[in-house]
Image (cartoon, grey):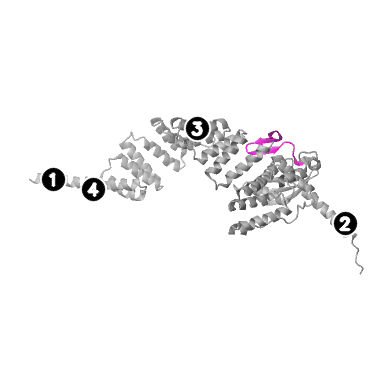
Amino acid sequence: MKIVLIILCITLSAGSLFSQADVFYAKGKEHYDKDEHREALYYFRKFIHLDPSKAEVFKWRGNCYFQLNQLDSAQYDYETALRLKPSMHELYFNLSGVYRERNQLPEARRYMKTYLKLVPDDGDGWLRMASMLPDDASDSATYYYQKAYQVDPKNINAIMSLALQYNYQDEYTKSLEVAEKGWNENRFNPDLANIINDNHFGLGQFKQALAWSDTLIKLEPQSLSHYVTKARFQILLETDMNLVERNGYQFRFKNISNTHIADLDRQCSDTSSPYHYATLQEKFNQNKTLSLDQYFMLYYGYTQDSRYSPYGNTRVNLSDDFDRKDYDAIIKKCEEAIKRDPYSPSLYEALSIAQFRKGLKEEFMINLRKHLGIVESMLATGNGKSYQDAYIVTAPSHEYDLLNYLGLTSTQQSLHDHEGHSYDILRAKAEDETITDIHFNIDKPFGSLGSMLKSSEKSDKGKKKKKD
């Protein structure tokens, strides 16, 4: 009888324990499915204390630890689960994630290779593998992106990754093919539309790129960048590509250089020249879209205008107005200032932004094109790296407009003479703290200043001296 009672007690006790374990299991899984990882962890711990034999619970608990950045505990649970159930292939994927979080990429890649041998049809696994490669392993990354796309051609991440990788390698046709196939399945994805747009640009297909800019605007009408892209393509469609050299997103004039200032002066004043200042001025004032070279020659031609005053006080403080979102005040101030400085890049930029915020889309696009046309045509005159490659500006303040457009900040300015030309060299700092010297040709503003000083001296000499 005693033996029977003991066996019965043991049986009842075991049944109670297993019943309690089932409760912990159910509660832990309920919280886990809701991404309530701390709560799930509490119950998984209790379950494992009672029943340490279930690999999936170790895996789930490891996932909780991983989400809470407790990587050592996550690794222990994944390895324990793998010992309990070697066929649970996703544990190799999870262990790879642990090592990736520690930035131990060789170990992370080792586990991912094992996982992909066992589960070769997982597109996300191939993408994970590509993301853990060193920066100089572009060919290997392409291979993994291709594998991800091959096993799951409808996976938007695989589509985007492969299309972007081809784009980075300047293989625009391949990138376009992948992105367009993806677009057929994801017609409201602005990221895909943006890749397609960029590939058309890379191929020099500006008309198609312009059409995709319109698509992007429809998808994201509040994104200012899409309108900027559209305005740029409108200008490029007017530009004879035989007149410029292209390097990626940058353009450089073949026949406009700071070393041929006299020739630029002649073309601006020659009524038979396509760059005759008065002719370009009329088109500009009629809000017609000019070519990149026409924008620059108009900008430069203003130096022959009687109103030209490069050292006049044309800067307008708009920061308080922007802080108050007083766009009417900004528009009024910019329009008044433009009368004094009709080709100031910063004025057209501020004016167009204010008009965009006011919903004046037609006026906004006109002035956005003027801003981009002027500033990007100035950039096309050189690269700023040397005297030979100096940017041409017609006012010192425009040097800072260019730096701002390039995301640079001036830390020092110095004046130089070189082979009969005048230059400003601005030491500029980028966001990554790198320092570079940017060269600007200032022949026109500096020459204007010299003329002003001579006129002032003559005026002083002509005055009668007062007798003592």
Type of amino acid at the residue the image marks with label 1:
Leu
Quarter of the picture holding the C terminus = bottom right
The span from disc 3 to disc 4 (Cα, nearest Å) is: 53 Å
Q: Mark 1 or mark 4, which has the lower sequence index?
A: 1
Type of amino acid at the residue the image marks with label 2:
Lys
Report the residue that reaches farthest toward the bottom. 468
Which residue corresponds to mark 4?
Answer: 20
Please say whether residue 390 is visible from this viewpoint.
no
Front in this rendered view, residue 120 or 71? 120
The span from disc 1 to disc 3 (Cα, nearest Å) is: 68 Å
Which residue corresponds to mark 1?
Answer: 8
Report helix, strand or loop for mark 1: helix
Q: With respect to residue 98, does 308 lie above or below? A: below
Type of amino acid at the residue the image marks with label 4:
Gln
Which residue corresponds to mark 2?
Answer: 458
Q: Residue at x 72, y 41 (%)?
A: 294
User: Do residues under tags 2 and 1 come within 8 Å of each other at their CB atoms?
Assistant: no
Position of 433 with respect to 31 (left or right) is right
Which residue corresponds to mark 3?
Answer: 181
Report the span colored magenta: 240-258
Position of 184 with respect to 307 (left or right) is left
Q: Mark 3 or mark 4, which has the lower sequence index?
A: 4
